[in-house]
Image (spheres, grey):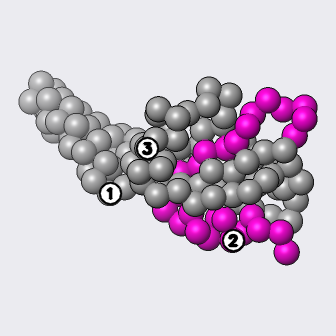
Amino acid sequence: MPLWLLALIYFFLLSLVLSIWAALGNTAALVSFIATSALLILIAIRTAMVIEVDEHELRVGRAHIALEFLGAANPLTSVELRALRTRDADPAAYLGIRFWSSTGVRIALHDSRDATPYWLVTSNNGDELVKALEPN
């Protein structure tokens, strides 16, 4: 998650802490401040989308697929990604996207048992992901 978004969330949480301080005093405010700070750290950790490629499979968050079922992987510019996740989207596609990331990769699939035509994955390092998916 980008720093600006974490700062915005923290601002809203701190306004809650301020309200608690005004109503209940210092001790309650300190407890709520510690709790909201811990909550922000938890939010940052839980919303991170980890993309991993090893010799057998691609993992995007909790989703995974064997490399043998992957087709061509194409890096996308922000304009191409915006079109592909809105107007040109296929409802059967897997979307591993985060709204704050403006570039990504489209990965075609070749699995006769799966109706998913492609995976759309947002990544700030799309070129590196494409290189990692290339057959050796």
Regarding residue 27, the answer to whether it shows in the image is no
Please state which amino acid type lies under the numbered disc 1.
Answer: Leu
Question: What range of the chain is rendered magenta?
Answer: 111-136
Ranked by sequence position, the earlier of labels 3 and 1 is 1
Q: In this rendered view, identify the residue nearer to me: 81 or 5.
A: 81
Distance between the Cα atoms at labels 3 and 1? 22 Å
Residue at left 26%, top 37%?
13
Q: In this rendered view, identify the residue nearer to me: 2 or 37.
A: 2
Disc 1 residue crowd, few under 14, some 14–19, many 20+, Cα 10 Å: few
**79 falls in the magenta region:** no
For the residues carrying marks 1 and 2, which lies nearer the camera in this image?
Answer: 2
Instruction: Give residue 20's quadrant in the image.
Output: top left
Please state which amino acid type lies under the numbered disc 3.
Answer: Arg
The residue where tag 1 is placed is 3
Q: Find numbered disc 2 in the image and state the secondary structure of the residue it sits on.
A: helix
Disc 3 residue crowd, few under 14, some 14–19, many 20+, Cα 10 Å: some
Residue 116 falls left or right of residue 125: right
Residue 20 falls left or right of residue 86: left
**128 falls in the magenta region:** yes
Please state which amino acid type lies under the numbered disc 2.
Answer: Lys
**Looking at the rendered structure, which numbered label has been put on residue 131?**
2
Distance between the Cα atoms at labels 1 and 2? 28 Å
Distance between the Cα atoms at labels 3 and 2? 22 Å
On the image, the x and y values in percent for residue 45 come to 51, 50
Ranked by sequence position, the earlier of labels 1 and 2 is 1
On the image, the x and y values in percent for residue 134 come to 77, 68
Disc 2 residue crowd, few under 14, some 14–19, many 20+, Cα 10 Å: few
The residue where tag 3 is placed is 82
On the image, the x and y values in percent for residue 124 come to 49, 62
Residue at left 85%, top 75%?
136
